[in-house]
């Protein structure tokens, strides 16, 4: 059971970018088609990925089990903690959008939260630029997040070492 609620470390950047591409599509559909019910799978996906990585996320499963293996792209492994932090921001924004829309009828405010997710997910999927990861690193440098939260983040060269 403990294994179920673990986040992968390291994370395959290729899979992370593909998951972000799915988030872009879901956010764009939510906004362009004015389909607030899509906030439910958006929020669920983020919360599931924060708690379990791809384990309980249907899109995470599709990406890690089918899409990524089909691509002939070498895995690029990155630390998991910053990616989990970024998923946490997405969870916070998507759940906020869900509550704003359905509990308070604040569709415009909910759309702003979805728009913020759309921008961040587009940067991740298209450019490989993770805003949440940058914020995580900034908070580590400011000692808001302890160094022990991500040992790999402290030593970027550790990822490139070949085991003896």
Image: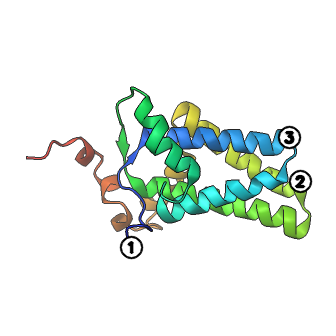
- How many other residues sit within 10 Å of disc 1, few (<14), some (14-19) or many (≥20)? few
Left or right of 46? Residue 12 is left
The furthest residue to the left? 164
Residue 27's disc number: none
Whichever of labels 3 and 2 marks the residue nearer the N terminus, that label is: 3
The answer to which image quadrant residue 152 occupies is bottom left
Identify the residue at horizontal 75%, vertical 50% (top origin).
Answer: 114
Would residue 43 be seen by someone viewing this image from the given angle?
A: yes
Image quarter of the N terminus:
bottom left
Query: Against 72, is 156 above or below?
Result: below
Residue 2's disc number: 1
Q: Which residue is mark 2?
A: 108
Would residue 137 be seen by someone viewing this image from the given angle?
A: no
Q: Position of residue 92 (x, y in %)?
A: 66, 63
- Quote the CA–CA distance across marks 3 and 2: 14 Å
Identify the residue at horizontal 39%, vertical 56% (top origin).
Answer: 8
Q: Position of residue 106 (x, y in %)?
A: 90, 61
Residue 33's disc number: 3
Q: Nearer the viewer, mark 1 or mark 2?
A: 1
Q: Nearer the viewer, mark 3 or mark 2?
A: 3
Q: Position of residue 30 (x, y in %)?
A: 79, 46
């Amino acid at each position: 059971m403990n294994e179920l609620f673990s986040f992968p470390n390291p994370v395959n950047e290729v899979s992370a970018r593909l998951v972000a591409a799915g988030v872009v599509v879901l956010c764009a559909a939510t906004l362009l088609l004015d389909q607030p019910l899509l906030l439910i799978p958006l929020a669920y996906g983020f919360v599931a990925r924060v708690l379990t990585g791809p384990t309980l996320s249907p899109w995470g499963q599709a990406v890690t089990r089918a899409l990524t293996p089909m691509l002939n792209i070498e895995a690029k492994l990155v630390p998991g903690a910053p990616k989990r932090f970024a998923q946490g921001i997405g969870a916070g924004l998507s759940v906020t959008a869900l509550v704003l829309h359905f509990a308070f009828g604040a569709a415009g405010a909910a759309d702003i939260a979805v728009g913020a997710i759309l921008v961040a997910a587009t940067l991740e999927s298209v450019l490989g630029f993770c805003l949440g990861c940058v914020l995580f690193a900034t908070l580590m440098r400011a000692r808001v997040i302890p160094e022990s939260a991500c040992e790999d983040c402290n030593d970027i060269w550790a990822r490139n070492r070949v085991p003896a």
